[in-house]
């Protein structure tokens, strides 16, 4: 009897130690490949969109410059707000987590939503790497050949012209509002849940025009006509599209995309990341330009400065919206 | 086990309670665009709930609730799941999963067989192996960072 | 024509075949795990495709996609949980079949049906793209709204038991879907003071919670697993040729389901999630014995699994011709195309024609590859699950679902939401409010809302903006279908009463 008991105990001990070894080794083995840690790059939108495509292009280049692998992960929801609020709440400022950020989203959302869950200034910005200007686009067989044609229609038929765009209080939306003000017309803005759904709506004739990004005009060159671009100069891949400025409306705007780290990250880490992203930007510039992106290189102090500049740009419109909401 | 319960009445009450909860959590400042659809839905939900209450009073469909097997086992299993879920962020994914699997397997097995210490030890190894398998797939193959608490 | 031949040539390469088989297997695994979706699998695969030449990358993605949509049926059949939302209806018949000890038969049926559906989708894509693409553009906000309402009328036939409770479940699902950020308007609602709720309830999280957890609790309550042992006669019936004959013996069902799958596929944003439910419903309606559905009717399983695989290639019609993703995984494929400088449109079929045709055909091959992979894998999985004692099955499935839920959005709170919903789902089930209507409401609520709001915005200049919903001819057709579908239970009862007067079997709709 006693012997059997001893054997049982021995067996247990062996099994327990095996378990303990497996439990400790596994994580160690999992990490053994990386002498230091890989970096997590969070995208606050669904895969397939502009932010995602860019991140994928950047991913492989960044690994060369940083010497570590970069893992792109997605955390969609709330127009970006879910990822941004979670980031500001939980991300550790150790340089191993960064997140993609967008203007004007991070300006507009905290300003207009009662509780966006995050603050515009709650990030340590690393860099703004590109800009996609807004563009007013119509179907190729639409009766409106120029911006003026469209505005004439809008003026004579208030609210009848429908302009689709991605999101509410987004770059597309705010630009439409600014155009309305500048041209003194009234259109109906129809929000869509992203640039994706905007395309069939436009091509299927369900909206009169779309205020989307330049990338759309380039991608669907054969099926659409760009009436105006909200940039300082004409986009090289859209040589026939006039800028709003040329046509007399001083409207420049679009979405800036960039990357940020949690507040309080070591400035040295930030500049290393900024350098990596800048170099990456130069390499992927050609591919991105072909898709209609405009590259920017706002690092260091230029980054928050850009945010302030855009804040001022949009201030008027945003305050009007805020006031209208309170009146209700 | 709740015998001979008026399930229509229960359903109607729950529906009504939800309608009320949703309705009164609507922010007064919210724009019409964002809320017109949900408001219509809440109204429809309330209507259906009232119809259920009426049916419950007039032509009740009575049934026995919670009459399948051991409710205590369900409760404990549910509890263990929640503890597991919460433990992940404190103890880390690996440790909490192994412990949770062990705990659930042990508790549920008690209903069917005797569990001796060596068996338990074997299960510990199996659980660790399982979790390790999934851990590798998710962190190495799919690049999904799993939550690390104090431990792994 | 010559392009097709050249395309076939490009595919006659052992590397391609290897990629197809491994892609299908990987997709199968992903699809079978509740919580891992096809989109996720593709998103993960994406970086690897950068290093591959365009054709191989696309072939890999197509194979994984095809395998994943098929794989969802495994979990649906064996554990009553759809592995992907495209297999929700497969559980309705598949699971009862397993309980009766006919699991292998069910798996074989699902395999053949999926393969046929996959090939059908490829054929649609190859030969009918242009007219289908034009049709897909005609769907505007009003049409989306009515399609969603049409989907909701399914609740009527899917709610076994009380219609009122089914509808209540549907509205609960819709309200769950409204939590978070409004799709139009962008403001947050129903967060009940928790900023984490801004992200709302993700559909997959609810799907897993509402289907898996009650099943696990059920096993716990009973103290045993519900998987019945496969009987000898059933094993015989599960043999390859017998299953093929069985599936092909009802061609009407098969053809109808494939067509439904294709129509739904070309509506951007709909996809497999909805296709399987509509096809199932139609199969039930067309059957001589609709009341048998829910107890293990092969036709229902065939309808569900064939229609959802049609959507794999089917939803690429708008993608390849217009650049519009027909379903979420297509967005990833679009990304790959753009990355390699391939622009959707005529160019894709002329200049890069060989590549495109090769890609499309490779998906057909993937569908074929599913048969051996699925039959072998299916038996393997069945054996593993059957041999596993229930007290290990519960926590292991729990592990897989917790992982899958977390991996979805890297969100720990999603896991908690899943657990809460699942437990609530179990309680609701007790009083007769079942998961399918709730999930249906969740899926369709968003589509209905976006369609409704956008449509009425489009009518901003009218006196009654709502009238915009009734403007287009396509809307009229859909409205007609809605009325027909909603009235069906009553019409059917009337029809039966007229046919056999005196036999007063009143159906409670």
Image (tube, coloured by chain):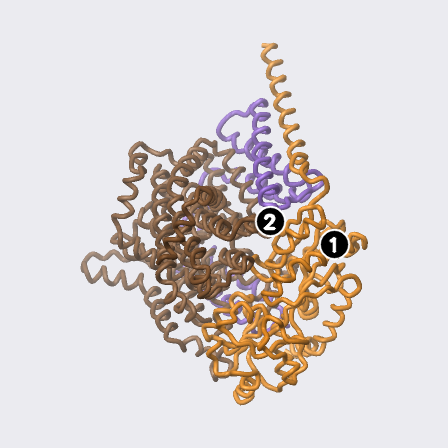
What color does chain B have in the rendering? purple
Judging by the rendered image, the residue that carries numbered circle 2 is: C416
Which chain is assigned orange? A
Q: Residue at x 55, y 46 (%)?
A: C404
Classify 10 Å Cα crowding around label 1: few (below 14), some (14-19), many (20 and above): many
Q: CA distance from mark 2 to mark 1?
A: 34 Å
The answer to whether C394 is drawn above or below residue A235 in the figure is: above
Question: Badge 2: how crowded within 10 Å, few (<14), some, or many (20+)?
Answer: many
* Picture coordinates of residue C456, whole percent (x, y): 49, 76
Is label 1 in a helix, a strand or a loop?
helix
Q: Colour of chain C?
A: brown
Look at the image and tell me whether residue A179 can be seen.
yes
Q: Chain of mark 1?
A: A
Residue under pointer 1: A273
- Residue C214 visible? The answer is no
Please determine whether, in this image, residue A248 is positioned above or below residue A214: below
């Amino acid at each position: 009897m006693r012997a059997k008991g001893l054997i049982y105990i021995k067996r247990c001990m062996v099994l327990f130690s095996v378990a303990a070894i497996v439990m400790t080794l596994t994580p160690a083995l999992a990490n053994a490949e990386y002498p230091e840690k890989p970096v997590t790059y969070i995208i606050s939108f669904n895969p397939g969109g502009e932010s995602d495509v860019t991140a994928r292009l950047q991913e492989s280049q960044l690994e060369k410059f940083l010497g570590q692998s970069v893992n792109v992960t997605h955390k969609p929801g709330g127009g970006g707000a879910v990822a941004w609020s979670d980031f500001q709440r939980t991300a550790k400022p150790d340089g191993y987590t960064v997140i993609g950020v967008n203007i004007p989203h991070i300006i507009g959302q905290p300003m207009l939503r009662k509780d966006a869950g995050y603050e515009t200034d709650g990030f340590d910005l690393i860099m703004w790497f590109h800009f996609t200007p807004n563009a007013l686009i119509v179907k190729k067989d639409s009766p409106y050949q120029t911006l003026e044609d469209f505005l004439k229609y809008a003026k004579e038929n208030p609210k009848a012209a429908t302009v689709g765009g991605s999101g509410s209080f987004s770059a597309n939306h705010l630009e439409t509002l600014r155009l309305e003000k500048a041209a003194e017309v009234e259109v109906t803005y129809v929000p869509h849940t992203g640039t994706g759904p905007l395309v069939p709506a436009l091509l299927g004739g369900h909206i009169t025009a779309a205020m989307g990004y330049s990338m759309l005009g380039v991608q669907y060159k054969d099926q659409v006509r760009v009436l105006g671009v909200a940039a300082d100069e004409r986009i090289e891949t859209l040589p026939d599209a006039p800028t709003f400025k040329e046509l007399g409306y001083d409207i420049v705007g679009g979405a800036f995309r960039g990357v940020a780290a949690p507040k309080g990250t070591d400035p040295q880490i930030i500049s290393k990341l900024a350098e990596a992203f800048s170099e990456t930007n130069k390499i992927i510039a050609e591919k991105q330009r072909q898709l209609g992106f405009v590259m920017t290189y706002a690092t260091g102090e230029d980054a928050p400065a850009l945010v302030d500049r855009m804040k001022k740009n949009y201030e008027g419109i945003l305050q009007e919206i805020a006031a209208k909401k309170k009146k209700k | 086990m709740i015998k001979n319960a008026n399930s229509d009445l229960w359903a109607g009450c729950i529906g009504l309670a939800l309608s009320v909860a949703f309705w009164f959590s609507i922010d007064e400042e919210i724009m019409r665009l964002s809320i017109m659809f949900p408001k219509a839905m809440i109204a429809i939900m309330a209507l259906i709930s009232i119809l259920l209450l009426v049916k419950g009073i007039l032509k009740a469909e009575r049934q026995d609730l919670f009459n399948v097997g051991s409710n205590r086992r369900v409760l404990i299993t549910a509890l263990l799941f929640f503890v597991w879920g919460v433990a992940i962020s404190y103890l880390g994914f690996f440790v909490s999963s192994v412990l949770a699997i062990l705990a659930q397997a042990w508790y549920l097995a008690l209903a069917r067989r005797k569990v001796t210490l060596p068996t338990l030890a074997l299960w510990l190894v199996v659980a660790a192996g399982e979790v390790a398998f999934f851990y590798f797939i998710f962190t190495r193959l799919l690049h999904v960072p799993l939550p690390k608490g104090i431990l792994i | 024509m010559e392009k097709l031949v050249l395309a076939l040539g490009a595919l006659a390469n052992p590397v391609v075949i290897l990629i197809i088989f491994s892609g299908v297997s990987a997709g199968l695994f992903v699809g079978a795990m509740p919580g891992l979706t096809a989109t996720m699998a593709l998103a993960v695969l994406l970086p690897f495709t950068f290093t591959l030449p365009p054709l191989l990358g696309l072939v890999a993605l197509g194979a994984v996609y095809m395998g994943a949509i098929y794989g969802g049926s495994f979990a649906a059949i064996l554990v009553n949980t759809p592995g992907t939302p495209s297999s929700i209806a497969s559980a309705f018949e598949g699971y009862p079949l397993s309980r009766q000890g006919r699991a292998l038969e069910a798996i074989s049926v699902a395999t053949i049906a999926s393969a046929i559906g996959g090939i059908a989708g490829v054929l649609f894509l190859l030969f009918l793209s242009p007219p289908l693409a034009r049709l897909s553009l005609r769907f505007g906000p009003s049409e989306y709204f009515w399609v969603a309402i049409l989907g909701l009328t399914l609740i009527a036939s899917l709610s076994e038991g009380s219609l009122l409770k089914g509808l209540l479940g549907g509205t609960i699902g819709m309200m769950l879907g409204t939590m978070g950020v409004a799709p139009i308007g962008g403001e947050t609602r129903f967060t009940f003071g928790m900023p984490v709720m801004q992200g709302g309830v993700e559909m997959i999280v609810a799907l897993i919670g509402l289907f898996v957890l009650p099943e696990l609790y059920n096993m716990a309550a009973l103290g045993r697993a519900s998987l019945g042992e496969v009987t000898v006669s059933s094993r015989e019936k599960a043999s390859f040729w017998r299953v093929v004959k069985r599936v092909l013996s009802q061609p009407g069902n098969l053809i109808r389901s494939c067509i439904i799958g294709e129509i739904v596929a070309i509506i951007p944003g709909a996809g497999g999630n909805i296709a399987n439910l509509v096809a199932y419903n139609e199969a039930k309606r067309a059957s001589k014995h609709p009341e048998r559905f829910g107890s293990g009717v092969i036709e229902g399983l065939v309808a569900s699994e064939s229609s959802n695989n049609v959507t794999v290639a089917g939803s690429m019609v708008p993608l390849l011709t217009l650049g519009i993703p027909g379903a979420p995984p297509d967005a990833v494929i679009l990304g790959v195309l753009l990355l390699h400088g391939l622009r959707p449109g005529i160019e894709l079929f002329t200049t890069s024609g060989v590549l495109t045709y090769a890609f499309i055909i490779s998906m057909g091959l993937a569908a074929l590859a599913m048969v051996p992979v699925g039959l072998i894998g299916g038996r393997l999985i069945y054996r593993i699950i059957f041999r596993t004692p229930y007290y290990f099955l519960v926590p292991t499935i729990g592990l897989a679902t917790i992982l899958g839920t977390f991996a979805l959005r890297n969100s720990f709170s999603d896991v908690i939401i899943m657990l809460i919903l699942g437990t609530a789902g179990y309680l609701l089930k007790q009083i007769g409010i079942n998961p399918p209507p709730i999930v249906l409401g969740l899926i369709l609520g968003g589509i209905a809302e976006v369609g409704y709001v956008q449509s009425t915005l489009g009518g901003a200049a009218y006196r009654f903006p709502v009238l915009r919903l009734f403007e287009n001819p396509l809307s009229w057709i859909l409205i007609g279908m809605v009325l027909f579908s909603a009235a069906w239970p009553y019409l059917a009862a009337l029809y039966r009463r007229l046919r056999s007067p005196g036999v007063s079997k009143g159906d409670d709709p």
